[in-house]
Image (cartoon, helix red, strand yellow):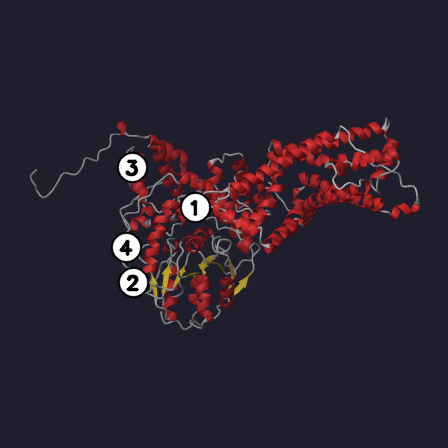
Amino acid sequence: MIKFNLFVLPFSLGLIYIVTSIVMHYYRWIKALPAVDKVKLSAGIRTPSKVLASLKEIFLEGLIHRKLWKRNPLLGYMHMSFAFGWFLLIVMGNLESRVYHGAYINAPYYPIFLKFFIHDRLVLFFEIFTVPAFFRFIMDFLLLFVLSGLVLAWIKRKQSKWFGMKQTTMHNFFDRVALSCLWLIFPMRLLAESYTAGYFHGGGGFLTQNLGNLLVMITPGPAELIAYFFWWTYSLVLGLFFIMMPYSRYMHIPSELLLIVFRHCGIQPRKWGSSFSDLEVRSCSRCGVCIDACQLNFAAGINTIQAVYLIRSQREQYIPENIAQTCMLCGRCQEACPVGIKIDSLRLIKRREIGSGQVSDFSYLTNPHPGFADVVYFAGCMSQLTPSIPIAMEGIFKEAGINYLFIDRNGSICCGRPLMLAGKDKQANELIEFNKTLIRQTRAKLLVTSCPICYKVFREEYNLPIRIQHHSQYLLELVKDGKIALQSQHRRVVYHDPCDLGRGGNIYQAPRELLGKISDLEPVEKDRTNALCCGGSLALMGTSMRTKDEVTLDALESLLAGDPDILVTACPLCKKTFSKLSKTEVRDIAELVYDAIPSRKTRIAGTVKDPEVVIS
Amino acid sequence: MIDFGYTLTRDRQLDYDRGDFRYLKLVKSLEPSMDLCIGCGSCTATCSAAGFTNFNIRRLHTVIRRGDPESIKAELKKCMFCGKCQLVCPRGVNLRNLILAMNRAIEILG
């Protein structure tokens, strides 16, 4: 017998629409991948370990929402109840429909509207333990599970703070329509199933049957018609939700699945954008976690440029320039993003579009042979503004008896990253080539830099055949090798993770280990991946210096909450920025290490401080 | 011409009525903090590019103010964008963005 009623049409049309749309999108994304990435993808999906890892992540992130659980249990539960609950409803609904329908193939609407077609009564006591009863129980339980999430979602609109979110995203029209549909789906289902169960005195589980009996009792009018009305509404909101999905944020559901597979196949974002970046843009759920993570938001009150708005405007094909340029590229939002979107790379793609048109002329740079050494020391531009850092480093090199070469003693040639942050990669490459030649000529085995900004670009863009270390790593190695002996000064210090060293270079442990040897390191509230930016970021363009100061002051307040003796950092730019506004002494880790060498022969008057003394 | 051992310097007078102030207007709108400059020259003293060549940010600034943008077009390309200038600026001029704005003005106005 064919089970059909007209009201299934809106749902069926919506389903056809969304399935076609997803297939077309998948096809377009995969087809538009660069050739290298296509090879990676086809190799990846043939590797069982990668497929398993993808499926595991899809389960944990797409259904359970593990990252959101870690962020806030209430937020995690809300998303899990929707995603996992709905998923189980579909699976269980399908299984249930098999019980009543012997065929292998069902019409897709049949499991969804099963209770409309099936409402047999449970008459005998032993039937409670039968398969249909089990399914009735489980389906009602799952519906309740989803509805509990819905209640939380309503509460979240008003009380987002309970969910660990201070600010939520400002949604646009399509998002609002889709959201309204999504919120209506499950209440409509509950009402439709309840009225039907109530009218037929059977067919419902613990929730729908009891609620149905009650509703039929208290509402006047024909229960059958009311039920039919709700079945229509249920089908309509489902169909409308499916049709709105490709135009709203809910496209992130199918997109993220493919993104996870892409990522496990080793596909990376490209400098000029690729379909991987398009996919990332579509995978954004506009949850707004990035808004709370952004220092420009909570320290400087700028709340229109965050990642969620960048991505939305990218999806609408137009990114206003101020959204692209007003960002410190500190990477905090990237760490917080539950989808793991590489937001900085998306923003840089836009900056490249803006900045690439202008040309540079570095023909004035000359290339004298720098000499030979075992270790090349590149202090970086910023270290020239904090001379105490290269002074300390030179002192340590001499103390440890290293054959070193201070390659940029007489003026740095910039490493190129500042140009890249402004989207001028071509110009940056000229400087990179120049510095590369300079470094290669020394025949050194190791490049040590004091600047995390340089460190990041040396590692990512230079392709140097030698080891590259930030001085915090290098100094720790010197201590471990017994080249320098340190004595703790027992001063209470806090350590500030520079963005490009921590999130950018994944170096968190080395400076802490080093500081543990020479001082009493105290914890701070926001550290490691959650560390604050000092506000001096070279990536922030187009805002006033006052904005930067606001960020700096906020970061200082958080870092100095425990009133330490010294604020230690490992970046000349952070040091310079903090020193401007900090009442507490700000020093670089290299200075502290140098002070902690009790036997140092290169005596300098007092401690190393900004530009008083120079080692001859 | 007879070589007297010295030459006349080029006439460097600027006629304000003939100045091209479109650039100044555009740059100012892109980076308003330009007006905070007191011309102390700290930016130029600390400049990375100035260590290798006669690149001079203060001069660029002055020249654009006087409505003579032609002479800076070639100069502007020398900036390495390292951002030391804005860290030393006592007035808080957003110098990196100022250079970007000047570049932008040249891109737009030719």
Q: How far apart, in angstroms, are the residues tagged by discs 1 and 2?
A: 31 Å
Q: Secondary structure at mark 2?
A: loop
Do callouts 4 and 1 point to residues on the same chain? yes
Please state which amino acid type lies under the numbered disc 1.
Answer: Leu
Image mark 2: chain: A
Q: Is residue A207 above or below residue A612?
A: above
Image quadrant holding the C terminus of chain A, namely bottom left
Question: Of the numbered discs in the image, which one, if any, rests on residue B63?
Answer: 3
Q: Are marks 1 and 3 on the same chain?
A: no
Mark 1 Cα shell of 10 Å, populated few (<14), some (14-19), many (≥20): many
- Label disc, if present, on residue A367 of the rendered structure: 4
Q: What is the chain identity of the residue bearing mark 3?
A: B
Where residue A92 appears, as percent x and y from the top left, is 76, 44
Nearest to the eye among marks 4 and 3: give it.
4
Q: Which mark is residue A371?
A: 2
* Residue A367 quadrant: bottom left
- Both marks 4 and 3 on one chain: no
Tell me the kind of residue under disc 3.
Val
Q: Which three-letter amino acid code belongs to the residue tagged 4? A: Asn
Question: Disc 2 and disc 3: Cα gap in Å?
Answer: 40 Å
